[in-house]
Image: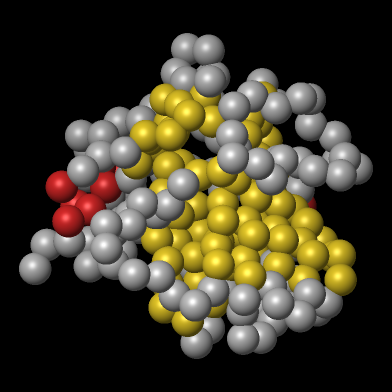
Amino acid sequence: MIPALFAFRFEWPVPRLDPWKKDSANWVPIDSQHRLQRVELGTGTAGNSLEVYLGWNAEGLGVRCLAGNLPDRPVSNPLQASSTDGLQIWIDTRNTQNIHRASRFCHHFCCLPTTTKGAQKGVVIQQPIARAKDEQALANPDEIPCRSRVDALGYDLEVWLPAGKLEGFDPIGSPRLSFYYRWIHHGIPDQFLTVGLEFPVDADPSLWQTIVLS
């Protein structure tokens, strides 16, 4: 049976941020303006809570993930980045919704929280996209700022994707981007922006949704 969400396309506005500072209290604010409202059509939710926030400026794109009510701390393994606990995101800086193989403007980042309590440095690992039409130089993890705070109930994960690591990032000329995410935590069903792995969301940009840099 085809999920109801497959029949729809969605888009969300993403507000502009102040200039990014590594030591600022919030890279992306936790508020309704920056929250990416997850779409569900009577599919039910897991017992945990998951919220994703987005923001942008000329320097890049900020992503924040709040995961709560978790049964235990995340277990993230950078050597298995595409299947370990954390937030995976896909971005197409050209919002090309009619292609089924990734172009050079498509990116896949695995954003991994730390596994210990407290404020720590997280890690972001860029992965190649299966069946991509174009080869792409992958960012070094040290080039993508990431920090996380883990407590007894969940974690707060913040990522700053620099404009130089997003091929084709042009907020003025191309403010519409394709965006998708998959959230993984061991022992809990994966959560997706819309449809899941019953479709090739990890490789087919036509299945991603749209964000508008406003």
Residue 123 is at least partly visible in this image:
no
In terms of depth relative to the viewer, which is nearer, 34 or 173? 34
Residue 78's place in the image compared with 160, above or below, is below
Rendering quarter of residue 91: top left
Residue 51 pos. (x, y %) = 56, 56
What residue do we see at 91% from left, 42% from top?
23
Residue 196 pos. (x, y %) = 30, 64
In terms of depth relative to the viewer, which is nearer, 43 or 14? 43
What residue do we see at 62% from left, 66% from top?
67
In terms of depth relative to the viewer, which is nearer, 39 or 201? 39
Q: Colour mode? A: secondary structure
What residue do we see at 80% from left, 43% from top?
26
Rendering quarter of residue 197: bottom left
What residue do we see at 76% from left, 41% from top?
27
Report the residue that reaches farthest toward the left.
Answer: 1
Q: Quadrant of the N terminus?
A: bottom left
Q: Is residue 76 left or right of residue 3?
A: right
